[in-house]
Amino acid sequence: MRPYKGRAGIFILEKRFIRVSLKRKDLLTLEELSGEEIIQILDTAASFKEVVQRPVKKVPALRGKTVVNLFFEPSTRTRTSFELAAKRLSADVVNFTASASSLVKGESLLDTVRNIQAMNVQTIIMRHACSGAVNLVAKNIRASVVNAGDGKHEHPTQGLLDIFTIREAKGRFENLTVTLVGDIIHSRVARSNIHGLLKLGAKVRIVGPATLLPEVFTRLGVEVYHRLEDAIADTDVINILRIQLERQDEQFFPSAREYANLYGVNARRLKLARPDVLIMHPGPMNRGVEISPRVADGPNSVILDQVTNGVAVRMAVLYLLTGGESDENSD
Amino acid sequence: MKESFPRQIMDADHIRRAVNRMAHEICERHKGVPDLALIGIMTRGDVLAQRIADQIGKIEQATPAVGALDITFHRDDTSTRTDRQPGRRPSHLPFSLENRRIILVDDVLYTGRSIRAAMDELIDYGRPRAIQLAVLVDRGHRELPIHADYVGKNLPTAEKEKVDVLLQECDGREGVFIIK
């Protein structure tokens, strides 16, 4: 037997370090993630997408772990998506709704989460109307915190699932232009998309009435448009954001009808875009306002794929946060 | 005399012969391929499964179905040894498992825990008629009642040693090594 002549160090490098785990306790923003970490989450999500298409859509990866859905704002899609993701990883899931909690009796936010943590919970999925509330909680507890939307700040798993859906359809980020339409200023989805897409090398445009577009985003390298027709020409993806009437404390545009006339994405305007343009919407949709039904249900729409991918992406996030690393030779 | 590490145990020719022999043994035991499927455990078992299947194809003039399994999410050491990043590709089983005779293929058989995870995962896809196991190297030290049906090489090792299998398709060269 001939001895191997190389150095053992190189040898091991080649073989074992093909994987790195997400070395962080929490997922609060896409701003804080590196491009490599985002790609790692997307690759893991691709594996989970295969899992959820099996006859038995469940793996034992998080068996014995407990995940709490802590939602201080209404949500059906995101909460259900996280709940399914955790259950398909075999974790136990507890749903906590703020209106039915001791918060209405005057308990502080931190006391509430410390009580939940005291019940030996590993992961807290949290949505809150205040930007930064998740950061406060994450700093003060040991459990992992996943931001499921904090005010107008970020919604990292929505950003990730949008990016996953784009990668699945387009297969690249270089020379790719993504246009975000509408209520950018109130949109946590927009912020997460912008940070994530720019890190991966895509170009990002924002378009909408001037009152809804923060100029500060140009500093990140985002192009600002005010005419929808100009923005959607030669773009690869149109991500249409919901007009968030509940977060608008003043009048940003004269009426929903006028908004629809100027910025609604409809079949007529879609003709100006590329034939293979991807139509996305994070939901819930205001049909007839920011998106016309024909576009929402048309052949370019991947809106329901986004929802399907959301479960796989959230499985990846829960899995990678609760995990660490191990070596391969445990055959 | 002191042994040096890493020590090469098999080279490309050894591996080729072992694969060919296992292919012959599988043919002999199964008498044909109609309901046979080879499923490799990623990321080297799938390469070996493909090689064995190609060899069976030469012997029987019919190639069995081949699949690849990513067992990361089924391992039992996720909580104690912490997690691992899944393989670079998802599991790929482009056929029904119902009533098939499955041969699981892995590079190294050690504790048996990977195989336990793989069997759990397979059963999530359907109910095979039988599952057998083929490994390139059996290095001993089992922690579960698992036994290989086809073995490329029995390799007595110390528990503190590591066995590395390198294959052209994923590592750019061939060989089985013991490293310390």
Image (cartoon, grey):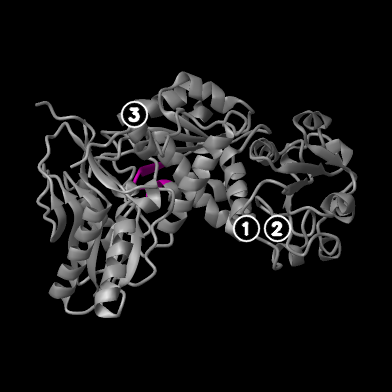
What chain does mark 2 sit on? A
**Front residue of this view, candidates B120 and A144:** B120
Instruction: Look at discs 3 and 1 and give the one toward the viewer.
Output: 3
Marker disc for residue A169: 1
- Cα separation, mark 3 vs mark 1, equals 39 Å
Q: Which one is nearer the viewer's eye here, A318 or B19?
A: B19
Tags 3 and 2 both on a single chain? yes
Instruction: Identify residue for label 3.
Output: A9
Circle 2: element type: strand
Q: Amino acid at mark 3?
A: Gly
Neighbourhood count class around disc 2 (C-alpha, 10 Å): few under 14, some 14–19, many 20 upward: many
Question: Is label 2 in contact with label 1 (beta carbons under 8 Å)?
Answer: yes
Contact flag, marks 3 and 2 (Cβ < 8 Å) = no
Q: Amino acid at mark 1?
A: Ala
What residue is disc 2 on? Answer: A278
Callout 1: residue from which chain?
A: A
Q: What residue range appears in magenta? A: A86-94
* Rendered position, A139 above or below A31: above
First in residue order: circle 3 vs circle 2: 3
Labels 3 and 1: the sequence-earlier one: 3
Q: Residue at x 81, y 62 (%)?
A: A270
Q: Are marks 2 and 1 on the same chain?
A: yes
- Where residue A299 appears, as percent x and y from the top left, is 69, 68
User: Does the image show residue A108?
Assistant: no
* Nearest to N terminus: mark 2 or mark 1: 1
Residue at image point 26% right, 33% down:
B80
Residue A272 in view in this figure: yes
Count of numbered marks: 3
